[in-house]
Image: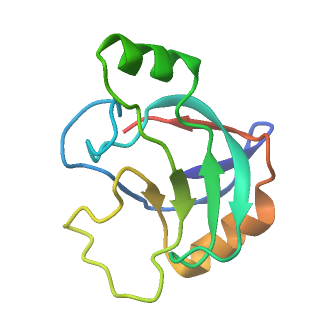
């Protein structure tokens, strides 16, 4: 993950994504991480995964696609820390979120404000 201001990379981090299956998140419970352009839309200082910032998934396109298939698009996608537990980087535990270490999440939380665009590409 790259934190960018204008054209300058301020920080970069290795991330964990939902990787139970390839491709863009489409439905509730598929374990996938959404891909494309989203925005930070909320902050959670009380996250069970240390700190978190919410991503505005599902957007109108995501909701329409899921509705056409008669399914729930899901939601509650966040960029968050690892939380208090030691995590296995080779086992998907993110349920479609984007995870960084707790220390890195402190930096993200301090630097990223609501409304900031987030481009996610696996």
**The C terminus: image quadrant:** top left
Q: Position of residue 84 (x, y in %)?
A: 46, 89
- At 72% from the left and 53% from the top, the residue drawn is 42
Q: Position of residue 96 (x, y in %)?
A: 37, 50
Residue 98 to residue 115: above or below: below
- Rendered image quadrant of residue 46: bottom right
Q: Is residue 25 left or right of residue 37?
A: left
Q: Residue furthest top?
A: 68
Residue 43 to residue 89: above or below: above
- At 54% from the left and 36% from the top, the residue drawn is 57
Q: Residue furthest front?
A: 70
- At 55% from the left and 57% from the top, the residue drawn is 79
Residue 107 to residue 116: above or below: below
- Rendered image quadrant of residue 65: top left
Q: Is residue 47 left or right of residue 22?
A: right
Count the labels in the image.
Answer: 0
Q: How is the image coloured?
A: rainbow
Residue 110 to residue 95: above or below: below
Q: Position of residue 114 (x, y in %)?
A: 79, 48
Q: Position of residue 68 (x, y in %)?
A: 35, 10
Q: Is residue 66 left or right of residue 84?
A: left
Q: Nearer the viewer, residue 26 or 39?
A: 26
């Amino acid at each position: 993950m790259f934190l960018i201001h204008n054209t300058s990379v301020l920080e970069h981090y290795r991330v964990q994504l939902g990787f139970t299956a390839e491709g863009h998140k489409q439905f509730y419970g598929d374990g996938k991480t959404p891909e494309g352009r989203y925005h930070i839309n909320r902050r959670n200082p009380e996250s069970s995964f240390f700190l978190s910032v919410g991503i505005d998934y599902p957007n109108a396109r995501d909701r329409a696609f899921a509705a056409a298939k008669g399914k729930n698009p899901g939601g509650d996608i966040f960029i968050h820390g690892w939380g208090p537990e030691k995590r296995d980087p080779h086992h998907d535990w993110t349920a479609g979120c984007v995870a960084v270490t707790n220390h890195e999440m402190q930096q993200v939380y301090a630097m990223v404000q609501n409304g900031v665009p987030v481009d996610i590409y696996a």
